[in-house]
Amino acid sequence: MSTSIFQSEQLLFTPGTPTPNRLPLIFAFPNTYCVGITSLGFQVVWAMLCARSDLQVSRLFTDVQEPLPQHPVLLGFSLSWELDYANILQMLEDLDIPLRSQHRTAAHPLVFGGGSVLTANPEPFADFFDVILLGDGEDLLGQFIDTFRTVHQADRATQLLTLAQVPGVYIPSLYEVQYQASEGAIATIKPHTPDVPAQVQKQTYRGNTLSASTVVTPKAAWESIYMVEVVRSCPEMCRFCLASYLTLPFRTPEAAQTLLPQIEKGLAVTNRIGLLGASVTQHPEFEQLIDYFAHPDRDQVRLSIASVRTNTVTVKLAQVLAQRDTRSITIAIESGSERLRQVINKKLQNDEIHQAAANAYQGQLKGLKLYGMVGIPGETDTDVEATINLMLQLKKEVPGLRLTLGCSTFVPKAHTPFQWFGVNPTAKKSLQLMQKKLRSQGIDFRPESYNWSIIQALIARGDRRISHLLELTRHFGDSLGSYRRAFKQLKGQIPSLDFYVFQEWPTDQILPWSHLQGPLPQSTLEKHLHNATDLM
């Protein structure tokens, strides 16, 4: 494979000086280089690994690779999109590594993984990994590597048992999952031996500096962009939201001491800056960042910004973005129904949405992108109509603003109050209705595939039994029909699609991730759930 693609990279970190006893490691992203190098998480972990003098790091993508060692001792994957699991299995096969950890020997590298998908619910993929890192990597990654170095010449069982003692390091093979029946719920999840922790705690980085790009390249999906993480987590805590609940607490580095120096570092190599985070404009010093980019010295800067909180869309913000080559701004409204927004704890009034649209238009932006959702627990036809009516009202009020509504189907996610709900099958009709009524009025309606949401829910709530289904499905294709075919083939061996996707689970049911502790205890999640159901 051609490696010329790597020659266009500008590194913004200093690789470690190699030592004679450095360990060979492959760090893989299960997608193309263009996609993988645009992942800030992948960039940061790669730089952390490369900065160590005791590691020899080679990158591997689905389309290109750096020269790979013949006998790597570690193989790491960064997984940020569920369906990329199929590429992980293919890459393991290409490297002649058994797919399942139980079939690997001392001749094979230890396969580890991290990223948002694995931190949320690693169980569908648990049998494919020797080690899973739960949570933020800033401290956890170094602790994992340091501990592995102390036992890298030991037998595999000793390696795994030793690594299991590191907080946030999850060794799936050291836990036994028993089921009430082959097609029933989980009965117990227990460690094999007393010296393995019964609960593995997700790790939270509490430092004052968040992530920023470690490489800039024109070959990225966002060409030559330098990314800065402005905030981590979100203070709003919408009850369905993985990005908020899984990453608590809300963290904001200082602007003058941290963010502005990071941005200056990026501007030394590119004029394109991306500000990332679940709720960027809720940084307490965001106004200072906007003033920085508004300065005439930054006239050539191209600024991109992630989704912002609706009531923070000011005329000034819109003007600065428009002047810095941004054509539209994105807000998440979830629904046009104020009642339903109360159910999900979305602190937003309709008049704030109208004001955001007016401010975006007055600030010379060309478009406003809105994120919505259907199938939210407690939703009625009236709520769906409210979203349609809101969009039509906005179209009349700001006819010069290009309106886009991206709409997904509610998917229950682990470690959130709505993890016990199932997918609402009426969501499919709601998407069809919205498409019919909005597109005819000149509103750009972009629904996320309902079938993809079903697959996403299956993986989001899946347990270890569906690993066999995932193996089958990758040979059938990634359509929902392929998953149904695999379920039919495995009938009697695993629960039904309905069990994983559509059923509402009781709060006393053992969840696939019950032994993996997120930021909040189950009792708190149950309280938030009850607060929501009281409003339905």
Image (cartoon, rainbow, N blue to C red):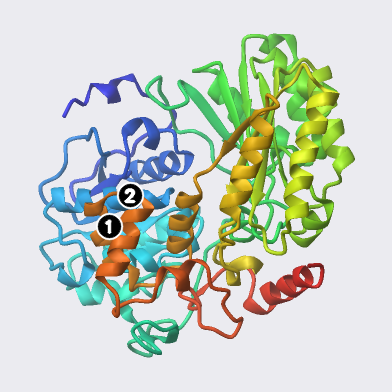
CB atoms of marks 1 and 2 within 8 Å: yes
Q: Is residue 334 left or right of residue 463?
A: right
> Which of the 4 image quadrants contains residue 42?
top left
Task: Assign a secondary structure to mark 2.
Answer: loop
The picture places residue 251, in percent across and down from the top left corner, at: 68, 50
Circle on res. 151: none
Circle on res. 473: 1
Residue type, numbered disc 1: Thr
The N terminus lies in quadrant: top left
Residue 136 visible within the image: yes
> In this figure, which residue is indicated by the disc labeled 2?
478
Q: CA distance from mark 1 to mark 2?
A: 7 Å
Task: Assign a secondary structure to mark 1.
Answer: helix
> Which of the 4 image quadrants contains residue 18?
top left
Residue located 56% across and 58% down the image: 411
The C terminus lies in quadrant: bottom right
- In front of the other: 499 or 57: 499
Dot 1: within a 10 Å radius of its alpha carbon, few (fewer than 14), some, or many (20 or more) residues?
A: many
Q: Is residue 28 left or right of residue 437?
A: left
